[in-house]
Amino acid sequence: MTTNPLLAYWVHDLSPFIIQFTENFGIRWYGLSYILGFLAAYLLLDYYYKKGRSPWNADQQATAFWAIILGVVLGGRLGYMFLYNFQEFLHNPLIVIRVWEGGMASHGGMLGSVLAGIWFTRKTKTPFLKTADIFCTLPPLGLFFGRIANFINGELWGKVTDVPWAVIFPASPFPLSPRHPSQLYAAVLEGLLLLIYTQIRFWTGKPKNRPEGQLCGEFFLAYALVRIFGETFREPDASLIFGLSRGVFYSLFLAAGGIAMIIWARRKAK
């Protein structure tokens, strides 16, 4: 008698809906992840102000909150269209508003956050590098919740593997093949690990050893590195660029930007 080895793996059967009203409409875990991420960002901003680590009062925090929301949502959606789905976007530009079908790009969300930060610094007359160091500590919890939602949705699955904790994703190209739960790896790397790193650096870094703007550069570089590492376990979800997955390719630019920002911050401090 032989045992089917596939029975040893958990088959993903989670629903993307918390409450489902119709076949394609309801309250989704993915939407909740964004709400939790933005709420966490707002609470952090308020806590920083109370502890004297942020110059922004309640009204300015609210302005920052809405600027971040618009930057992340618009940047993430447009980033997905331009970086991952450009041909279909050219064919039918109206798909950009069909957000219920999914499609957000973390790199685009970060670019949107940078633009929101530039606007906010002009609005509040706060130095850009100081704003950048505060803003960069806000995304990790949102990234953590978002990657957990990716796992619940059964999307962005990993490569085929035989590790004991592998998961079978019925929606994947080979629905009986066990795969890395790469979404959970990303939640730990991009979310929890970067949360711990940025918070330690934010609260304990001495100004003379960490000029304004360096923490933001470190965040961009660290995110790029953990994203590149995580991509080794993830099945590419779009065509390759120069033999690299798009997550790796775009992260190279983010890493370069992080290094450039660190250099800029150090030179400006001198």
Image: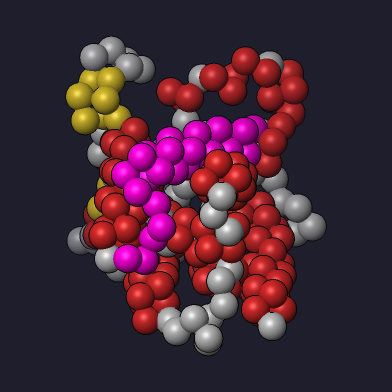
Q: Is residue 83 magenta?
A: no
Please report the residue visible at 32 percent of the width from the left and 61 percent of the height from the top.
Answer: 48
* Residue in the picture at 56% in, 50% down: 125
Can the viewer see residue 121 in this picture?
yes
* Residue 2 on image: x %, y %: 24, 61
**Where's residue 261, x and y in %?**
67, 68
Q: Is residue 206 left or right of residue 93?
A: left
Which residue is nearer to you in this view: 156 or 48? 48
Q: Which residue is painted at 55% across and 41% down in the image?
A: 123
Q: Depth check: give the residue in front, 118 or 230.
A: 118
Question: Where residue 155 sits in the image (x, y, percent)?
Answer: 43, 42
Magenta range: 52-81
Left or right: 224, with 41 as reference point: right
Above or below, 67 against 88 in this view is: below
Side of 109 where 191 appears, left or right: left
Q: Quadrant of the N terminus?
A: bottom left
Extreme residue toward the right, this view: 242
Give the quadrant of the C terminus: bottom right
Whether residue 179 is visible to the viewer of this picture, yes or no, is: no
**Residue shown at 55%/33% (left/top)?**
74
Residue 78 belongs to the span the image colors magenta: yes
Q: With respect to residue 53, does 78 lie above or below?
A: above
